[in-house]
Image (cartoon, helix red, strand yellow):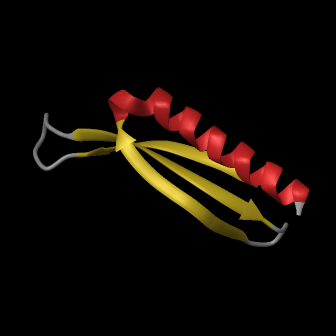
Amino acid sequence: MHLRTECVQLKSLPGSGSKFRIVELLICNGINEYRVLNFQLEEKFSKEANILGNEFCRLIKDRVKKA
């Protein structure tokens, strides 16, 4: 299981645009990757997006260990 984040800037006109932080939580089996969760927030909330993604990852890993 791993967490992937990226920053995307969308532009409709030169000099304008919006930046977003995309967070994806993936489960890997060595061959394929399966997306469990993904969300996006404005770039100004990137710190919170990373914290939230890490917390989701930790909760899922803890739950899997208990099963």
Q: Residue at x 79, y 55 (%)?
A: 63
Q: Is residue 27 above or below residue 3?
A: below
Q: Residue at x 85, y 66 (%)?
A: 30
Q: Nearer the viewer, residue 65 or 4?
A: 65
Residue 57 spot, x, y in % from top left:
69, 47
- How many numbered circles does the render carry? 0
Q: Is residue 14 above or below residue 1?
A: above
> In the figure, residue 18 lies in which quadrant?
top left
Q: Residue furthest left?
A: 13
18 relative position to 28: left or right: left
Q: Residue at x 44, y 32 (%)?
A: 46
Q: Nearer the viewer, residue 41 or 65?
A: 65
Q: Is residue 31 above or below residue 39?
A: below
Q: Residue furthest front?
A: 66
Q: Which image quarter holds the C terminus?
A: bottom right
> In the figure, residue 64 lies in which quadrant?
bottom right
Q: Which image quarter holds the N terminus?
A: bottom right
24 relative position to 45: left or right: right
Residue 5 spot, x, y in % from top left:
54, 44
63 relative position to 12: left or right: right
> In the figure, residue 20 lies in which quadrant?
top left
